[in-house]
Image (cartoon, grey):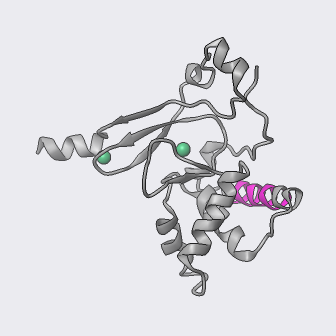
């Protein structure tokens, strides 16, 4: 059984680290606009800016962190607008709330299968990819009883930077 019931916006994760990735980001933004229109969601310049900032970064920002970046370009925008846009994105499979992050929620717009390592000290969220984790087999009674939308693995620990700091 497949868990891909949504048509996700799929963006190559490498674009975030690639300096020439500008056009790919524009491509993702076009996909975002098309998907919003299909879903009947309003496509406002603010929403586009929020999506663009989110797809550009691998920092898995909170609403507050995104707000701080976006308000330079949109001085009139409020934290509440950013927060509500992110929750709307998450509701419609345009982005998702990174599992295990508690409060504040952290968001990710990279809908390709990937896993997260979460540092409990600095709260950094590091993407990683491990193919077997993309195909986790669930017990049959769960698969049959429920509709599975997303399966993922997240790992908690202390990152390399924090380990080095505590060693000094
Ligand atoms: Zn850390
Ligand atoms: Zn991620």
Say which residue appears at 60% left-offset and 20% top-offset. 136
Say which residue appears at 55% left-offset and 80% top-offset. 71
Taking the image in four quarters, ligand 2 sits in the one at: top right
Position of 11 compared to 167: left or right? right
Say which residue appears at 70% left-offset and 21% top-offset. 145
Say which residue appears at 51% left-offset and 30% top-offset. 153
Q: Toward which corner of the image does residue 164 lie, by quadrant?
A: top left
In this rendering, is residue 125 above or below 32? Answer: above
- The residue lying furthest to the right in this view is 38
- The residue lying furthest to the front in this view is 145
Residue 154 is covered by the magenta coloring: no
Residue 26 is covered by the magenta coloring: yes
Q: Looking at the figure, which quarter contains the N terminus?
A: top right
Q: Position of residue 155 (x, y in %)?
A: 41, 33
Position of 146 compared to 118: left or right? right
In this rendering, is residue 66 above or below 21? Answer: below
Q: Position of residue 168 (x, y in %)?
A: 11, 45
Q: Magenta segment, which residues? A: 22-34
Count up the numbered dots.
Answer: 0
Q: Position of residue 150 (x, y in %)?
A: 65, 34
- Nearer to us in this view, 52 or 3: 3
């Amino acid at each position: 059984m497949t868990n891909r019931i949504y048509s996700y916006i799929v963006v190559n994760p490498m674009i975030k680290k690639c300096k020439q990735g500008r056009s790919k980001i524009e491509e993702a933004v076009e996909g975002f606009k098309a998907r919003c229109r299909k879903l009947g969601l309003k496509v406002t310049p603010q929403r586009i800016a929020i999506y663009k900032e989110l797809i550009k970064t691998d920092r898995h920002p909170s609403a507050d962190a995104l707000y701080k970046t976006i308000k330079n370009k949109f001085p009139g925008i409020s934290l509440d607008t950013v927060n509500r846009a992110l929750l709307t994105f998450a509701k419609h499979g345009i982005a998702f709330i990174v599992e295990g992050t508690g409060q504040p929620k952290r968001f990710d717009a990279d809908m390709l299968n990937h896993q997260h390592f979460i540092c409990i000290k600095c709260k950094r969220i590091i993407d990683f990819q491990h193919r077997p984790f993309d195909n986790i087999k669930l017990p049959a009674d769960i698969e049959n009883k429920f509709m599975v939308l997303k399966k993922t693995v997240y790992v908690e620990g202390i990152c390399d930077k924090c380990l080095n700091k505590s060693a000094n």
